[in-house]
Image (cartoon, rainbow, N blue to C red):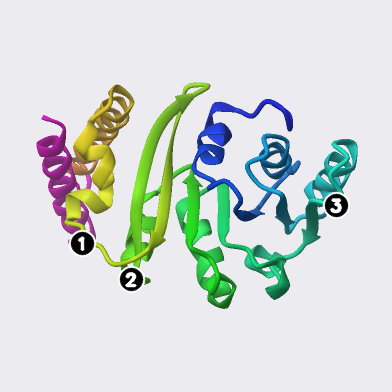
Amino acid sequence: MNAQKLSKRLETVASFVPTGAIVADIGSDHAYLPCYLVHQNIVNKAVAGEVVKGPYESALRQVKLEGLEDKVIVRLADGLQAIEDNDQVDTITIAGMGGPLIVSILEKNPEALTSVTRLILQPNIHAKVIREWALRNEWAILDEVILEEDEKIYEVLVLQRGKMKLNEQQIILGPHLVAQKSNTFMKKWTREIDNWKRVLQSIEQAEQTPEIVQKKKELVHLISLVEEAIK
C-alpha cells in the first residue's frame, strides 16, 4: 500500500469522500489516504492528524515525498485538535481503530465538528458504539459497507447530519448491512453466533452467580436477535 494504491479498506473510505471536500484524516499514520485523495483530484486540501510522534514524522516524510506540502497539512495533535477553524474542514475520516476509540475522539472535541457535514468512520471492531453515538448526536447513517481484506472483516460507516431511528437489531448489525445481507455480513455474524454459543456453553459450567446469570441472559438475547436477522 502507498499513496498511489490504497488497501481495499482505505479505498472504500476514500470512495465516500465528496469531490471538492476539505478533509481531515485523524490517525493518518503515513498520510496515504489524504495524499491519495489529492492525487486522484478528489480533494485540493487535506489535514493529516497524528497523535504519535513516529507516525507523524512518517506522514511528514510521505507528504514531502509526494510533493504535496502545499495541499496536505500534517499536524501532531490529539484527535480532532488537529483541525483548526481556518481549515474549514467539512469531511472527517477516521479509520483503523476500535469503535470506542473513534467515539471518544468525536466526543473529546465536539466543537471541531461545527462545520463538518460528513463523517466516514472505519472501526476495526464494535461498530455498534458508533451507531449509538450517531443516534445520541443527531447524525444519520447515509451508507455502510462491510468488506473482507487479509482474512479480517471491516465495516465502513458514512454519517451525515440528521435524525434517524434504529431498532436494537439495526444498532448491532447496521441498518444498510442487515438489509443487504451480503456474504461477508453472513460470514461475520455466523462466526459471532458460534463464538457466543461457545461462551454460553462454558459459563453453563460456572457457578451461577447473579453476574453469570445476567451474562447468560444477555448472550441468549443477542444470539436470538442476530439469528433472527440472518435467517
Q: Which of 186 and 3 is in front in this view?
A: 3
**Alpha carbon separation for disc pair 3 and 2:** 37 Å
Q: Name the residue under label 3.
A: 70
Q: Is the C terminus in the top left, top right, bottom left or bottom right quadrant?
A: top left
**Front residue of 114 and 102:** 114
How much space separates mark 3 and mark 1, taking CA atoms? 42 Å
Quadrant in which residue 162 is drawn: bottom left
Disc 2 crowd rating (10 Å Cα; few below 14, some 14-19, many 20+) is few
Location of residue 181 in the rendering, given as x and y in whole percent from the top left corner: 23, 30
Residue at figure coordinates x 42%, y 29% from the top left: 147
Tell me the element at label 3: loop
Q: Distance between the residues labelled 1 and 2?
A: 11 Å
Instruction: Answer above or below: position of 84 versus 218.
Output: below
Give the labeled residue for mark 1: 165
Q: Callout 2, which amino acid?
A: Arg
Residue tagged 2: 136
- Pointers 1 and 2 in contact (C-beta within 8 Å): no
Residue 166 belongs to magenta span: no
Q: Is residue 142 left or right of residue 102?
A: left
Q: Which residue is at 74% across, 44% downward?
A: 31
Question: Can you give x and y, in whole percent of width and height, for residue 54 in the image?
Answer: 83, 48
